Image (cartoon, rainbow, N blue to C red):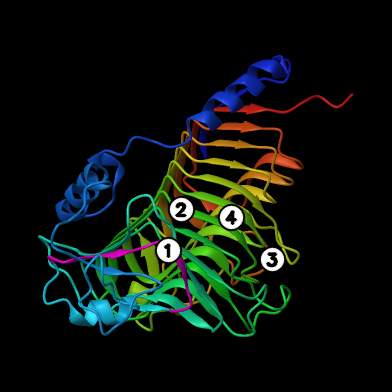
Amino acid sequence: MYGNIKKYQIMPFIIFFSLIISMTAYAKINITANDISGDENLKSTALSLPAKDNVIDQNAVYVATDGSDGNPGTIDKPYASVYYAIRKISSSDTTIYIRGGVYDQKIAVTKSGTADKYLTIKAYPGEKPIFETSSTGRIIDPNNNNYIYIDGLTLKTKQEKIANSTHGIEMVQGHHLIFRNLEIYNINVPDSTSSSVASHAFNLYGNNASVPISNVLIENCYVHDLDPGWSEAITVNGNSEYVNVINCRIKDIGNIGLDFAGNFGACSTTTLDQARYCVARGNEVSGCISPNARSYGLYNDGGSNNIFDRNIVYGCSGGIEIGSEEGGRSGKLPVQNLTITNNLIYNNNEIGIAVGGYSITNKNVGYVNNVKIYNNTIVNNGETDITVNKSDGLDYRNNIIYAEIPK
């Protein structure tokens, strides 16, 4: 371990308070190609989308709550279900617009787009379609399809609690998917202390060794008021690579906010069982508190070559953790080459930044290797601002730690 710490215990708190207010007001970043992990197709497509937000595609079909699947799908005679609209379109050049209102239905995507034209399912400009399901499973199921763009929808359940596992969006393979401007909430397990049922806003569970989850962008989504039990609001696990979570707000989660995971057996091919080359940038994460264990806003548990950059994390049990819960087991992949830069981490209940396997005595818990922690501001976290355990090659530079002196 090497590096330096800038620690100010006598600096007036008003300076740091002003810093927090300033950074919170400008938490979102202006996305450039350098901010996105993935290939040129994902980058160029993602950067082109904001200019099209309020432009109506003339080659479009429509879905509305007062529609009918016997209609032709025009704006005056819309379809009733998204599933039927997807089945009816002849090519991915067709955009599916969803009018405002509440839909008691799920979205099973049964077609792929192309590299030149993503299959697009989006809210009609200025309107709010809400998909409110009363059943379990996936509210949106990409069904192993590729080149898909979903924008502006709200996903939730009708009940306060669902008896079986429910997910806003869940996928096990597929590439080039963009999820923008989604709101996902009220997806809760019946018993927070039980590990038998899980829920997620996003569950990217790469279980296929031949086809990874790759080139995914989750942008400007609002994920809030979830109780995932022992799971996380956003999970990237198994054979997954080049997944980006950018400019999202993650708030009031009953456990961890986001996790880049690995070594849990999601993918049966051990050498691929790890989220890698993933990015969390420009997110605001707060209120991630579990009744079961310490829960972090942002967590890398078993992933490698991942980045946490320019996030704001506050009011959670812990801010950011780089860990390896399963990495000490025989045959598991190393957890290495992680970067934590330019984050603001403040007023978390227990720890600001935690690095390394959480237990020295538990041999199943592994080491983390080659972690860079640069230019972070870590303020007034309850127990300690930074803790280090079972780590090798920690590079810690130019961080500011501030803690009020007890009176």
From this viewpoint, which residue is outermost toward the right?
407
Magenta segment? 93-105
Q: Are marks 1 and 4 in contact (CB under 8 Å)?
A: no
Q: CA distance from mark 2 to mark 3?
A: 18 Å
Q: Residue at x 41, y 68 (%)?
A: 333
Left or right side of 218 for 353: right
From this viewpoint, which residue is outermost toward the front?
76
- Residue corresponding to mark 3: 361
Under mark 4, the amino acid is Lys
Q: CA distance from mark 1 to mark 4?
A: 13 Å
Q: Mark 1 vs mark 3: which is more N-terminal?
A: 1
Q: CA distance from mark 1 to mark 3?
A: 19 Å
Under mark 3, the amino acid is Thr
Q: CA distance from mark 4 to mark 2?
A: 9 Å
Task: Give SS at disc 1.
Answer: loop
**Which image quadrant is residue 191 in?**
bottom right
Q: Mark 4 vs mark 2: which is more N-terminal?
A: 2
Task: Give SS at disc 2.
Answer: strand
Vertical order, 141 against 54 (above or below) = below
- Residue corresponding to mark 2: 369
Left or right side of 344 for 358: right
Q: Nearer the viewer, mark 1 or mark 3?
A: 1
Q: Mark 4 vs mark 3: which is more N-terminal?
A: 3
User: What x and y, as percent, mark residue 295?
Assistant: 66, 58
Task: Give SS at disc 4.
Answer: loop
Q: Are marks 1 and 2 in contact (CB under 8 Å)?
A: yes
